Amino acid sequence: MTNNLFSHLIAHAGLDRTALIVPAHGQVSYRDLDRMSARYANALRGLGVKPGDRVAVQAEKSLGAVLLYLGVLRMGAVYLPLNTAYTPAETSYFIGDAEPTVFVCDPAREASARDLCRDGLTQVLALGGSLDALVENQEDHFETVAVSDDDLAAILYTSGTTGRSKGAMLSHGNLLSNVTALKESWRYTQDDVLIHALPIFHTHGLFVALNLTFFSRASVILLPKFDPDAVMDAMSSATVLMGVPTFYTRLLSHPGLTAEACRHMRVFISGSAPLRAETHEEWKERTGHAILERYGMTETNMNTSNPYDEERRAGTVGFPLPGVSARIVHPQTNTPLPTDEIGMIQVKGPNVFQGYWRMPEKTASEFTADGYFITGDLGKVDGDGYIHIIGRQKDLVITGGYNVYPKEIEVEIDAIPGVAESAVFGVEDADMGERVVAAIVRDGSCDVQAADIENHLGSRLARYKQPREIVFLAELPRNTMGKVQKEVLRRNHAAAANQRSTREVENAR
């Protein structure tokens, strides 16, 4: 067996075990995955893709998208998934930075994609269109390319609150080490059947859900998206659900959610955003299952997990996974902190990425002298060893499991005529985890309104990044150094919301 991740995922290709159950398509065996992914690899090779070349993909979740991912892996190329909600303006940056040999998109995006790739360096094909025509004529056999543990398997872009987006480089060894640790920690076996309702353009749905299930010789019910009714229907034949907190809050509103409906399920796993303790407790009361929460990042995949056999403690992310080291340090001195003291979370292990694409200085700044990755998250370890995520040093907002970086939105808002400045922040939301709020100061040149902001952002940013609320202020709160105090904005917004709620109750009397 080679070090190529594909060989570990589909090493059992001779088996006729069911790998995927796809609505409107039927069952797909591991033998089918081997045969059909070979066609995609052959098609890409025919397009001139070589080991190490990037293949960018912005396509809806489908059987073809899964096969394309596997085909890219087995030929030693680098898979670059892009959020399907990105606008052409956003996508253009990633294409320019990564310089993919091929950009695969949905047929509806093909024309705009060709406009983005006018320099001729990147070929554009449509999944469900021109690419399929190429794939149909390919052979069913492809000799999987041998790679080293450090060879890149994927690049996933992640942003900071300042500066341009960064491409996190993940190797075959990084991804293989993580699924090996998760298989052990979550007791995954070939008897498991996963309900897959996540998107497959980020770590959670792709590298945790799909990779782990294939690595374990298990099966996946591949739902096109999260739909509470579809998830409830699937529970009778499934054993595992992986989701973001929003999945669980919405399922708790489903009248069919009972302990009896969940009796066939083995484990419910949550990640990508903090799970509220109230959601954890209500889920346990309704279903008899304690949700297993874990902690990961684009740059590291999974770092920690609540235990499978012992207490899954609400409000915590458990313990470091096998092979992973985590520590809490003082943000300024880098000195390890004692129990229950809040500091910066740093992690080290074979799961940690190879660095940021074409950003060696940024990569160096994100690691300590002894090799720990500086996560940017604040946390603590309690007396029993459970890790708690307290907050984020950066102003990241996580809504519905998606990362939203305020600076990107602020730049767009500040460019609108009539806007002097803006500050974007997140506030707690029972459904989405957090919702995006924009505080705006007018410059007096014109009477800019919320509708003007919404109209501008509608064509510039993905929907999940667009503020759910817009408030206009006379000025933004600042400290003595002139820095905008977003914590004050959050606190003031919460107080205003409470006042509105109180007035509504009084008016109803």
Image (spheres, rainbow, N blue to C red):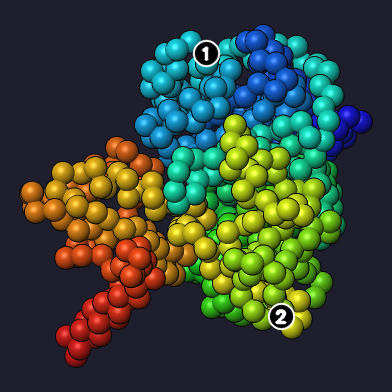
Residue 303, x across and y down, in percent: 72, 58
Q: Which residue is mark 2?
A: 339
Q: Quadrant of residue 264?
A: bottom right
Residue 23 in sight in this render: no
Q: Quadrant of residue 358?
A: top right
Q: Nearer the viewer, residue 380 or 397?
A: 380
Horizontal side of 94 relative to 18 (left or right) equals: left
Q: Residues within 10 Å of mark 1 (few under 14, many from 20)?
A: few
Q: Nearer the viewer, residue 96 or 77?
A: 96
Image height of 361 relative to 267, above or below: above
What residue sits 70% from the left and 23% below the top?
Answer: 52
Image height of 269 relative to 443, above or below: below
Residue 434, x across and y down, in percent: 43, 64
Q: Which residue is mark 1?
A: 121
Give the mark nearest the N terminus, 1 or 2: 1
What residue sits 75% from the left and 48% below the top?
Answer: 351
* Residue most extreme to the right: 1
Residue 231, x across and y down, in percent: 58, 55
Residue 435 in sight in this render: yes
Residue type at mark 2: give it.
Answer: Thr
Image height of 135 relative to 443, above or below: above
Image height of 173 relative to 382, above or below: above
Distance from disc 1 to disc 2, alpha carbons, whole Å, reads 53 Å
Horizontal side of 466 relative to 364 (left or right) equals: left
